[in-house]
């Protein structure tokens, strides 16, 4: 069996950035091939969304996503003694599901920019973006179903379906939060586990499954992915308020302007502090667009303890993720690479 060191050409771990670059190099040709199999108008929307073409269908090289989920598939496959190349199918599948969710999420949140470009629905319209997302989701099951090992393919499709249903349930719950004046923090955490953590945990489990990991290893890596998913979303929510627009590609304080009940906000609203009560009053009113409004809301989240709680909880979840990784007894250098990916995902600036 080819080892991780032979695959990467080194006997020491890839850095997180190197792992993500390697993931894109392995993933993108296969991902493009699957997108090209879609009907022409649908493929055009998807290609634009992935950054491969511009709005006119001409070749482009726009910023791409992080490819964290397929990187976890590859890393977990190597951690149990397999190779990244052998786990290409589940890596493509989880990336297709992730981008289905992004296309739909941009519409639900009315986000107008992603990765420094107009979102697909603003360019091609809501129906076209919805259908492109649906097509990517359908393709994900086909990618796994085309694999020769029918038993493994069947398990993979079932797990991916479970992750997708959890994601959709979490998204629906998240949308319903916008219609409620109060959301308990525990309920928001449960929503995050479904909306974000489920796909990361199954990405890790699929990598182990494809490489023949033991049930115990697969379960430990699944827990690693779940805790990492929680930490990842906390980091994402922090960036949604305090991230640099020039780096994130999204407007400053976009989550606050849209009155999104992200985890730091819910923690602040649930704090019982004067700042939390003032935040609740302002959140109950529609955004007026006044200069300084977003700054005031962000300051109240800090004063009510929402930011410090989110930062501390992200670190706790990262620690739990790394504990679960150790339980899996992963092979080196994949173990160190997965740990580095986890730290980067939770302490990133975009």
Image (cartoon, rainbow, N blue to C red):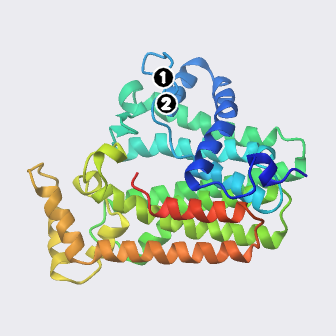
Residue sitting nearer the eye, 307 or 255:
307
Q: Secondary structure at mark 2?
A: loop
Q: Secondary structure at mark 1?
A: loop
**In the rendered view, does 72 fall on the left or right side of 50?**
right
> How many angstroms separate mark 2 from mark 1 (CA)?
7 Å
Residue 29 point in image, percent of width and height: 67, 30
Q: Residue at x 65, y 37 (%)?
A: 25
Number of residues whose C-alpha sits closer than 10 Å to that of mark 1, classed few (under 14), some (14–19) or many (20 or more): some
Residue on which the image places disc 2: 51
Residue 329 point in image, percent of width and height: 77, 73
Picture layout, residue 208 above or below residue 127: below
Residue 68 visible, this angle? yes
Picture layout, residue 40 above or below residue 74: above
Number of residues whose C-alpha sits closer than 10 Å to that of mark 2, classed few (under 14), some (14–19) or many (20 or more): some
Q: Residue at x 72, y 42 (%)?
A: 141
Residue on which the image places disc 1: 60
Q: Residue at x 48, y 32 (%)?
A: 49
Identify the residue at the far bottom of this view.
272
Residue 23 point in image, percent of width and height: 64, 44
């Amino acid at each position: 069996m080819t080892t991780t060191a032979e695959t990467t050409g080194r006997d020491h771990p890839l850095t997180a950035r190197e792992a993500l670059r390697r993931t894109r190099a392995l993933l993108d040709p296969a991902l493009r091939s699957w997108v090209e199999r879609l009907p022409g108008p649908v493929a055009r929307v998807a290609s634009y969304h992935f950054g491969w073409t511009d709005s006119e269908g001409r070749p482009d090289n726009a910023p791409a996503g992080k490819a964290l989920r397929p990187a976890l598939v590859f890393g977990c496959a190597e951690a149990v003694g397999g190779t990244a190349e052998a786990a290409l199918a589940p890596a493509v599948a989880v990336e297709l599901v992730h981008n289905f969710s992004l296309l739909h999420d941009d519409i639900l949140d009315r986000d107008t920019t992603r990765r420094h470009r107009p979102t697909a629905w603003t360019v091609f319209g809501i129906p076209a973006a919805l259908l492109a997302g649906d097509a990517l989701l359908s393709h994900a099951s086909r990618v796994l179903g085309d694999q020769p090992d029918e038993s493994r393919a069947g398990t993979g499709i079932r797990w991916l379906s479970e992750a997708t249903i959890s994601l959709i349930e979490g998204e629906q719950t998240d949308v319903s939060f916008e219609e409620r004046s109060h959301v308990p923090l525990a309920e928001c955490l449960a929503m995050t586990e479904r909306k974000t953590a489920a796909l990361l945990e199954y990405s890790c489990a699929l990598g182990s499954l494809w490489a023949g990991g033991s049930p115990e290893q697969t379960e430990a890596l699944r827990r690693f992915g779940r805790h990492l998913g929680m930490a990842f979303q906390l980091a994402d929510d922090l960036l949604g308020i305090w991230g640099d627009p020039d780096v994130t590609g999204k407007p400053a304080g976009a989550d606050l302007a849209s009155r999104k009940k992200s985890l730091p906000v819910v923690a602040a609203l649930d704090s019982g502090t004067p700042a939390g009560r003032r935040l609740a009053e302002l959140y109950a009113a529609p955004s007026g667009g006044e200069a300084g409004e977003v700054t005031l809301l962000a300051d109240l989240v800090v004063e009510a303890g929402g930011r410090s709680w989110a930062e501390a909880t992200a670190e706790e979840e990262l620690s739990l993720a790394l504990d679960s990784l150790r339980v899996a007894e992963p092979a080196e250098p994949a173990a160190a690479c997965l740990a580095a990916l986890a730290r980067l995902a939770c302490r990133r600036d975009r």
